[in-house]
Amino acid sequence: MFDDRLKNLRKARDMSQAKVAEDLGLPQKTYCNYERNEREPNSATLIQIAEYFDVSIDYLLGYTPKSC
């Protein structure tokens, strides 16, 4: 669920993985692995991603709809 939501948020903003990774201060490979469900972010990175996309951590993890 996290990987799909992350990918959808990025694509909705018409951004590349490289741009998002750069903005977050992550290696592109790490970010790519999040979208491919091959790696999970630690709690600090999860918070950073939620703030970056202006969504809740619950939304990223699939617990609530986007509007909450």
Image (cartoon, rainbow, N blue to C red):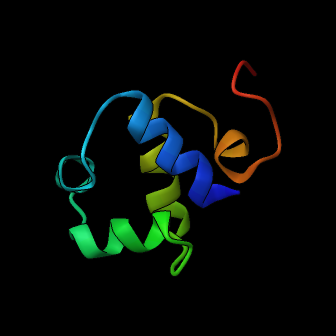
Instruction: Give me the residue at 50% from left, 71% from top.
Output: 36
Instruction: Give me the residue at 27% from left, 75% from top.
Output: 29
| Figure check: 44 above or below 36 | above
Instruction: Give me the residue at 58% from left, 59% from top.
Output: 3
* Residue closer to the observer: 59 or 13: 13
Residue 16 image offset from top left, x and y in percent? 24, 46
Residue 52 image offset from top left, x and y in percent? 39, 37
Q: Quadrant of the C terminus?
A: top right
Quadrant housing residue 40: bottom right
Residue positioned most to the top: 67
Instruction: Give me the residue at 81% from left, 35% from top.
Output: 64
- Horizontal side of 68 relative to 57 (left or right) equals right
* Residue closer to the observer: 37 or 26: 37
Q: Quadrant of the N terminus?
A: bottom right
Residue 17 image offset from top left, x and y in percent? 27, 54
| Figure check: 62 above or below 39 | above
Count of marks placed on residues: 0
- Horizontal side of 10 relative to 8 (left or right) equals left
Residue 61 image offset from top left, x and y in percent? 71, 53
| Figure check: 11 above or below 42 | above
